Image (cartoon, rainbow, N blue to C red):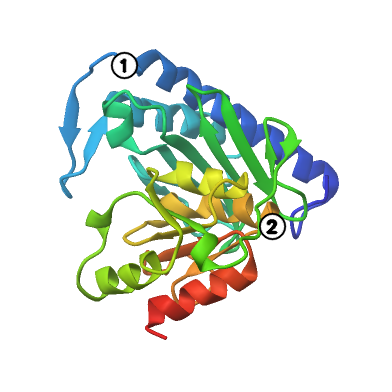
Amino acid sequence: MTAPAGSDAAEADALVAFAERLAEASGAVIRAHFRQRGAVDRKDDATPVTAADREAETAIRRLIEAEHPDHGVWGEEHGRLRPEADDVWVIDPIDGTKSFICGVPLFGTLIALVRRGAPVLGVIDQPILGERWIGARGQPTRLNGRPVETRTAPGLAEAVLATTSLGQFAGADARAFARVAGSIGLLRHIPDCYSYAMLASGFVDLVVEAGLAPYDFFALVSVIEGAGGVITDWQGAPLGFDSDGRVAAAGCPALHARALELLAGA
């Protein structure tokens, strides 16, 4: 395996293997809770959270603390620890809690390693369907060990656009999204990280979303870029801790560039 920047090959292989262990630990928790009709709480922002969310993140953090106590952690459910560290694990234990609550296996666990502000490793794990996409800087993205790649759509008129929900767009963002949606061949509502997984595997051409936090998008970067795709904010800038949460991903640079033009009103 080609090493992520700043690492040697042995370290890179060890970090990928460790990320898989994190996914296995969280997956075991999630499978035990899936379709069990457990209690659903509401966070301060009114979004739902379950015991599975909290316990899966706890399982991940426990392993990080045991084996990489100098690394930072930022998880959706339990906050930040050592955010100033060079290496920070950014975690969303269940990206797609609403799908999880409804018994729909189109959610995923997102695990990213961010090194000095740049993502170098990402995992999208779907523990119910047994699907795991892993991307690491400098190597092809793999789904359950086999390389995957994005596809090149001839143009927007033939492209498949995916997004979680139209409800995430308001005002100018809604008008911007409508310009893209009005130019593509097919719009599908594929929830949360699963749409990006389908883009990496060549079944979706474009994903446009808003309101994402770093734990929602950092893992996606390595997965999509390693499959040949492009993912940035709506201005074309790399995604980072200070991004505004608006994300555009595409299977090829030309489609991505045209989508950004439409988002900007061109």
Q: Position of residue 204 (x, y in %)?
A: 53, 50
Rendered residue at 57%/69% (across/down): 255
Residue 177 in the image: above or below residue 107? below
Quadrant where the C terminus is found in the figure: bottom left
Q: Earlier in the sequence, mark 1 or mark 2?
A: 1
User: Which residue, given by chain and number where applicable, does mark 1 sit on?
Assistant: 35
- Seen from the viewer's position, the closer of residues 190 and 15 is 190
Disc 2 marks which residue? 228
Q: Position of residue 134 (x, y in %)?
A: 65, 41
Question: Dividing the picture into quarters, in which one does residue 241 lie?
Answer: bottom left
Horizontally, is 183 left or right of 206 in the view? left
Q: Residue at x 47, y 36 (%)?
A: 109
Image quadrant for the N terminus?
top right
Q: Give the residue type at disc 2.
A: Gly
Which of the pair 246/81 is nearer the observer? 246
What amino acid is at disc 1? Arg
Residue at 49%, 41% (x, y): give it: 110
In percent of width and height, residue 205 lies at 55, 56
